Image (spheres, rainbow, N blue to C red):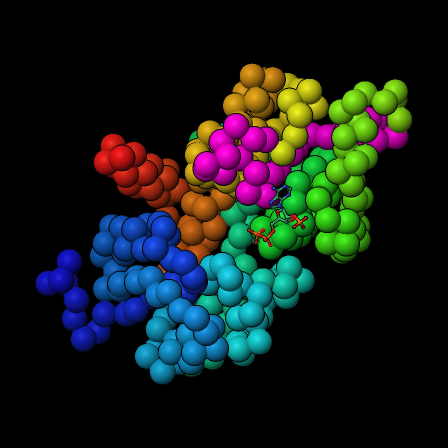
Amino acid sequence: MIETITPATQLYCIFGKPVSHSMSPLVHNMLFNAFGIDALYLAFEINDIKKGVDSIRTLGIKGASITIPFKEAVLAHLDEIDETARQIGAVNTVINKDGYLWGCNTDCAGAVEPLKEALSGGESALSSGTLDGKNVLIIGAGGAARAVAFGVKQEGGNITILNRSKDKGEKLAHQVNGKYLSLSEYSEYNEQASANTISNHLDHIDIIVNTTSVGMTPNIDESPVNPSILNKNMTVMDIVYNPLKTKLLKDAEIAGCKTVDGLSMFIHQGAAQFELFTGIKPSRQIMRETVLKKINQKDNLK
Ligand code: ATR
């Protein structure tokens, strides 16, 4: 790799804190290499996103991925923000067009594309499924939930937000013309308190997306929903990818649901980002295999 770096090598990067766990350098460098592009992608752990953005301008960095905790703060420092990213209030991709910095959000498409694939029967299916008219329960109301919710809304889905804190949940539900379901209403449903409106509502859910960290290592025996609400007509997606098969996804498989794991969203948002960086649409299957190989190597070392 060292031999291939030249004075003309273009630099791409990720800014975040922490970034030591990030799989983005692995994936983007693999793709640059595979397509013979003279570019390099590095991870920078920074404290100040303004200085990060200044460095994009100073060093002529061609493109940057933005991750936690800077996805919201970065907006103030860019020259132009894509409309969807502005609505979500978060940018995860910055493109440097000759010094003019444009920000957008690929998490949105990253969440929606694998859902559509699952609805149609997988990546190899001839046409993708549609979210139009589907009832989607989104658990959580943070940054990831916002990206998922705006993506689903753009595709015509009907949204219900289930969140621990009411204010955030209600606000997001309102912004996407959805409905807010409080945890207490949800618990009431779990206790089977007769056929009330909540149960009617939950009975018609087609898709569940968990955007909270519930079920993430080390709390792998936790799930954000009671398995009793799952049925075989549902598609269930978890954005947690550590572990890849969360308790929620295991319960969903047992219930006969279609499942979408957290790596899918990571891969799809990264593929959309690579296309913005280079104009090339990469194979998501190869990206996924690259990440899985790395995860398995790490597991073997433990
Ligand atoms: P991200 O940007 O990854 O979405 P975030 O903005 O911190 O992260 O949002 C995390 C979401 O997961 C929030 O909606 C949070 O609920 P609150 O709004 O009540 O804080 C939710 N969440 C995190 N841990 C949770 C837990 N243990 N139980 C229920 N909800 C949880």
The answer to whether residue 287 is visible is yes
> Was residue 221 drawn as part of the magenta stretch in this picture?
yes
Q: Is residue 201 magenta?
A: yes
Which image quadrant is residue 63 in? Answer: bottom left
Quadrant of the image containing the N terminus: bottom left
| Residue 157 percent coordinates (x, y) | 71, 41
Residue drawn at x 58%, y 62% as measured from the top left: 90
Residue 192 pos. (x, y %): 81, 20
Q: Quadrant of residue 243?
A: top left
Q: Residue at x 63, y 52 (%)?
A: 142
- Identity of the residue drawn at 10% across and 63% down: 3
Relative to residue 150, is residue 179 depicted above or below? above
Would residue 187 be found to the left or right of residue 116 on screen? right
Q: Quadrant of the C terminus?
A: top left
Which x, y percent locates residue 65?
A: 43, 62
Magenta part of the protein: which range?
A: 197-223
Estimate the x, y position of residue 79 in percent, counting from the top left. 54, 78
